[in-house]
Image (cartoon, helix red, strand yellow):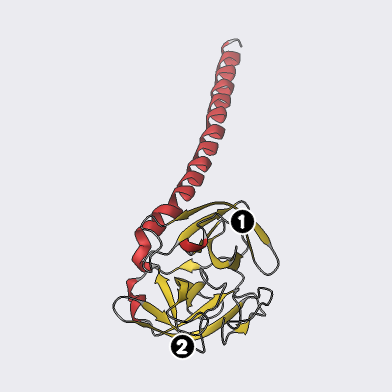
Amino acid sequence: MVGGEESRDTTLDAVVRVGACSGVFVTPTALLTSAHCVEATPKSAASADREYAIETCTAHPDGITAAHDLAVCRVTSPASSFFKMNLNPAEKAATSATLAGFGQPRALAREPPRLRSIDVEVTHDGSAFIAGTSARTACRGDSGGPVLRGAPGAYEVVGLIRGPTGAICASPTEWTPLFANSLWLTSTLEPRARAANGAERSVSASLVLPLVVIVATLAWLIRQRLRTR
């Protein structure tokens, strides 16, 4: 993250490394990253102090384009932190945001991945969503990282970093908005939640039925005992 500051607190714990890119948890077991980062499914995602095995990744079906460069990856163990998605189209009018990722601090750097963030101005020219300047922008390894709105401790994800608009690490950043992909995101994320809820209902039903049988049996035994007196 060119011009960014290294994160030294827990407000960005939901941001992770995903292969050579970045990503962000939006539920305890699902993270978002760029579709171009998962053409080969990465094996794991990692925060500053924890690693998560990736189970599956699903890229947007419309291909790797600026408008739809998104993927949902599932992990096998829950994350301790995640950010809410903001799918409100009104975010198109936003003028500022925070970028976060594990990218390099400058074009020729070869440093170990470190989480950095930067506050930038954002614009929308009718066809593209742009963030930052040539001196304050995303760099190699930041693709898939979140574009955040709100204050630390109350961040919401409004988009994902896609890549440079020109020279790598030396031009403003193009990003993919979430609100333009809200139907795909909700339909991709919801089936697992519905399955979990269905499993809970099945467990409840499996517990209720034996209880009903026990109660009915006890009632019958009591009636039989009363008749023999």
Q: Residue furthest top?
A: 228
Task: Tell me the number on the disc at residue 133.
Answer: 2
Q: Is residue 119 above or below residue 16?
A: below
Residue 9 percent across, percent down from the top left? 66, 78
Residue type, mark 2 in image: Thr
The secondary structure type at the circle numbered 2 is: loop
Q: Nearer the viewer, residue 132 or 9?
A: 132
Distance between the alpha carbons at the discs numbered 2 and 1:
36 Å
Residue 70 percent across, percent down from the top left? 44, 62
The secondary structure type at the circle numbered 1 is: loop
Instruction: Please state, as top left, top right, bottom left or bottom right, where the C terminus lies in the image.
Output: top right
Residue type, mark 1 in image: Pro
Q: Are marks 2 and 1 in contact (CB under 8 Å)?
A: no
Residue 20 percent across, percent down from the top left? 59, 66
Q: Is residue 64 above or below residue 150?
A: above
Disc 1: which residue: 78
Residue 113, quarter of picture: bottom right
Q: Residue furthest bottom?
A: 135
Task: Tell me the number on the disc at residue 108.
Answer: none
Q: Residue at x 34, y 66 (%)?
A: 180
Q: Residue at x 46, y 88 (%)?
A: 133
Residue 184, quarter of picture: bottom left
Q: Residue at x 60, y 10 (%)?
A: 228
